[in-house]
Amino acid sequence: MKKKNVDIQAATAGEALIDLIADADGRLQACLGGAVYNLTRALARQGVETLYLNPLSRDCFGRQLALALQHDDVELAVPEPVPQVTSLALVNIDAGGHPKYAFYREGVADRATSAGALTLACSQLESLSVVCTGALALSPDDGETYLPWLAAQRQAGRTVVIDANLRPSVMPNLDLYRRHVLTALQYADVIKASDEDLECLNLSGVGAIAQARHLLQYSRASLLALTRGSAGAVLLTRFGQLFQAREQAPIPVVDTIGAGDCFLAGLVAAMLQQKLATDWGAEAVKDNVASSLLGSAIASASLCVMQRGCVPPTRAEVLARLGSVGISFW
């Protein structure tokens, strides 16, 4: 790895793939994607020194994925391409701009890694303070890769951020999948989930906020970020506080691909800027700090949904939106 890696703040582990987005006429548009890949680029564009831990393919799609990461100044833990092919996702967009996925992920490059390889890469980063994963990395089939790595990162004192970002339609055993996701979330200091994710997990409570409280109570996390689409977002803390926010004006939505990934990047970027401790949220949280995190996250997601596919905003674009668009906090 390059000398620059001594300055790495965040490391990400999970899928990098090509989204084949179906147009209205049936043609497929190939876009760089994958939730963790999107998050990785989004973090880097917001000024976070970021390392992507998984391998990428030597095929044409893999080279495109690598070039885009390098263009955004993301460091690659595995700079040499591997022979396995790139993962694919077939994406259909519904009338509301929401994507439906079908994945092709057998024998693919981003899964050609191990818990040992991920842990070793992180152990060489003196300044690493945050690790992030989620989405397809929460498949039970990859438990032996990601769970030991998550345990090692928590033991090392790094802030573990996990995005539930569930994909139930592609999991053959939904009960096993739910149990595995809940197991993985036990390693998290920060959980990000949507209202749809919480509903899929069959959690106790009426409504998303009650379900989020239940999940936070029965995890070891200090903070849970809940996204609610046009209704905005919520931060819940282990201390028991609840903060809500949303933009005041309607947003012209092209599609929502990558919106949650950009939301999480805005949240993590603000957390690092504020230099928050790993257990931040276990004690009383100041209103201005929570507002800073929520505002950054919401503005990041809003900028994403106004474009086709996932085009993560820069930090300057996020700050400009915060300065020009009203956000209500309560």
Image (cartoon, grey):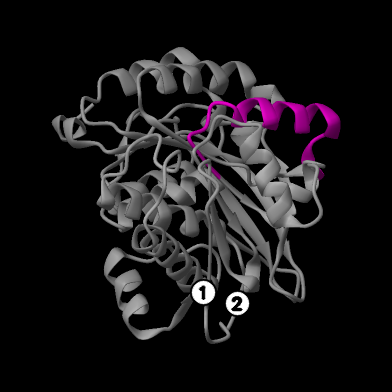
Amino acid on which disc 1 is placed: Gln
Whether residue 173 is visible, yes or no, is no
Q: Residue 30 location, x and y as percent?
A: 57, 59
Question: Compared with residue 46, is residue 308 higher up or lower down, i.e. above or below?
Answer: below
In depth, the one of 25 and 215 nearer the eye is: 215
Tell me, for residue 307, which label it has, or none. 1
Q: Measure the C-alpha gap from mark 2 to mark 1.
A: 6 Å
In the figure, is residue 264 to the left or right of 140?
left
Q: Residue 312 location, x and y as percent?
A: 42, 62
In depth, the one of 327 and 217 nearer the eye is: 217
Q: Residue 200 location, x and y as percent?
A: 79, 46
Q: Which of the 4 image quadrants contains residue 229?
A: bottom right
Q: Secondary structure at mark 2?
A: loop
Q: Residue 105 location, x and y as percent?
A: 66, 35
In the picture, the quarter occupied by the N terminus is top left
Most common SS among magenta residues: helix
Which residue matches tag 2? 254
Given contact means CB atoms under 8 Å apart, are the residues at marks 2 and 1 in contact? yes
Mark 2 or mark 1: which comes first in sequence? 2
In the figure, is residue 61 to the left or right of 176?
left
Span shown in magenta: 169-191
Question: Compared with residue 18, is residue 299 higher up or lower down, i.e. above or below?
Answer: below
Q: Residue at x 64, y 57 (%)?
A: 20
The reply to whether the magenta stretch includes residue 189 is yes
Q: Which of the 4 image quadrants contains residue 58?
A: top left
Query: Callout 1: 10 Å neighbours few (<14), some, many (20+)?
Result: some
Whether residue 278 is visible, yes or no, is yes
Question: Compared with residue 147, is residue 264 higher up or lower down, i.e. above or below?
Answer: below
The reply to whether the magenta stretch includes residue 325 is no
Q: Residue at x 26, y 54 (%)?
A: 47
Q: Residue at x 32, y 65 (%)?
A: 314
